[in-house]
Image (cartoon, rainbow, N blue to C red):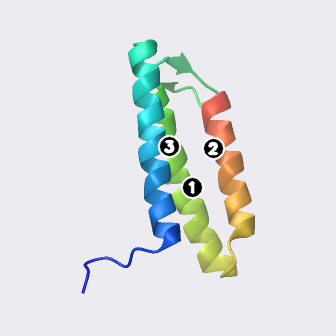
Amino acid sequence: MSWMAWTWPTALFFIGIFSAMGVLTVLELRHPGGDERRGALGLVTTRGDRLFMTILGSIYILLAGLGLFGMPLWGPLAVAFAWAIFCFWKV
């Protein structure tokens, strides 16, 4: 008996998170300083801050979609992708 039900969606989730962290590590090594900028919300953020806000916001969007509409989550997933684009483009 294993401690976690490893399914393909679970594996893809972790692969995605660790891949994003790997890309940010490579970017930080090539261009140190975190690419700070002041965005639409008036916050000074780095690439890591924007990734964290994207992941946290996406979790809330998907949980709200699950609670309000149930399955499937294609609509909230599209909103989460739009949120990710907004975070890395404007925040």
Q: Quadrant of residue 86?
A: top right
Please tell me which of labels 3 and 2 falls first in the chain: 3
Q: Which secondary structure lies at badge 3? A: helix
Q: Of residues 12 and 34, which is closer to you in this image?
A: 12
User: Mark 1 or mark 3, which is nearer the start of the sequence?
Assistant: 3
Q: Which residue is mark 1?
A: 58
* Cα distance between the residues tagged 1 and 2: 8 Å
Kindly indicate whether the residue at mark 2 contacts the one at mark 1 (C-beta within 8 angstroms): yes
Question: What is the x, y in percent for residue 71?
Answer: 67, 81
Up-down relation of residue 20 to residue 80 (above or below): above
Q: Amino acid at mark 3?
A: Met
Residue under label 2, please give it: 84
- Mark 1: secondary structure: helix
Residue 19 coordinates in the image, percent (x, y)? 46, 43
Q: Residue flagged by tag 2: what amino acid is it? A: Ala
Secondary structure category for the residue under label 2: helix
Residue under the point 61% across and 37% down:
87
Dot 1: few (<14), some (14–19), or many (≥20) neighbours within 10 Å? many
Where does label 3 land, which residue? 53
Q: Is residue 8 visible?
A: yes
Q: Is residue 52 something that shows in the picture?
A: no
